[in-house]
């Protein structure tokens, strides 16, 4: 079997564009998620707060899951961007619902380093991300 350089080059260009867009959306999501929380993850994590790191890590994984799904169902960058935007809104919305209605003192718990609450928060983000990803079929 021989390598068709033209086919490889075309695939490599598609890969670079898709991967670059996914990384960009992940970075933007992370920043918007941090803006949406009433606590400063960067400061909490820098001071050694594991709860903040776990909660943020869960949110990042929770968003990466639907990004991966969107990459697998579309080759169009505009359609991928639309799926990424929808997934981000759902992820941030779900986190807001958890903080405002389900665990009303989640902010205090995260700021105090409550690891159990952070794991619940991260698991919820990942669970929503899985559902988000699975729903991107049509």
Image (cartoon, rainbow, N blue to C red):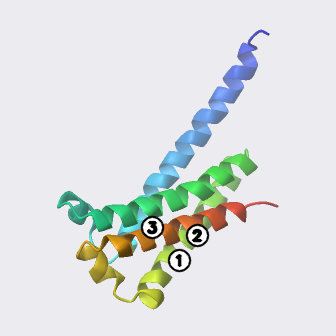
**Residue beneath label 1, please?**
94
Expressed as whole percent of the image width and height from the top left, the position of residue 71 reads 67, 48
User: Which dot marks residue 131?
Assistant: none
**Mark before the other along the chain sequence, 3 or 2:** 3
**Quadrant in which the C terminus appears:** bottom right
Give neighbour class at mark 2: few <14, some 14-19, many 20+ (Cα, 10 Å).
many
Left or right: 86 in relation to 27: right
Q: Residue at x 49, y 49 (%)?
A: 24
Q: Nearer the viewer, mark 3 or mark 1?
A: 3
**Mark before the other along the chain sequence, 3 or 1:** 1
**Residue beneath label 3, please?**
122
Q: Residue at x 69, y 28 (%)?
A: 11
Label 3, label 2: how far apart the Cα atoms are: 10 Å
Splitting the image into 4 quarters, where does residue 41 fall? bottom left
Q: Residue 134 versus residue 9: which sits nearer the camera? A: 134
Expressed as whole percent of the image width and height from the top left, the position of residue 9 reads 67, 22
Q: Using the image, determine if residue 7 lies above or below residue 59.
A: above
Residue extending furthest left? 47
Q: Residue at x 38, y 66 (%)?
A: 55
Expressed as whole percent of the image width and height from the top left, the position of residue 88 reads 55, 65
Label 2, label 1: how far apart the Cα atoms are: 7 Å
Q: Are marks 2 and 1 in contact (CB under 8 Å)?
A: yes
Q: Residue 34 versus residue 128: which sits nearer the camera? A: 128
User: Which dot marks residue 128?
Assistant: 2
Expressed as whole percent of the image width and height from the top left, the position of residue 64 reads 54, 54
């Amino acid at each position: 079997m021989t390598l068709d350089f033209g086919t490889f080059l075309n695939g490599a260009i598609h890969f670079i564009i898709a991967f670059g867009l996914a990384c960009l959306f992940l970075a933007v999501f992370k920043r918007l998620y941090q803006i949406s929380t009433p606590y400063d993850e960067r400061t909490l994590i820098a001071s050694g707060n594991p709860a903040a790191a776990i909660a943020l890590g869960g949110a990042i994984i929770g968003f990466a899951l639907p990004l991966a799904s969107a990459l697998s169902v579309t080759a169009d960058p505009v359609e991928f961007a639309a799926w990424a935007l929808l997934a981000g809104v759902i992820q941030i919305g779900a986190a807001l619902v958890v903080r405002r209605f389900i665990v009303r003192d989640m902010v205090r718990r995260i700021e105090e380093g409550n690891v159990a609450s952070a794991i619940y928060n991260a698991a919820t983000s990942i669970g929503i991300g899985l559902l988000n990803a699975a729903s991107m079929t049509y």
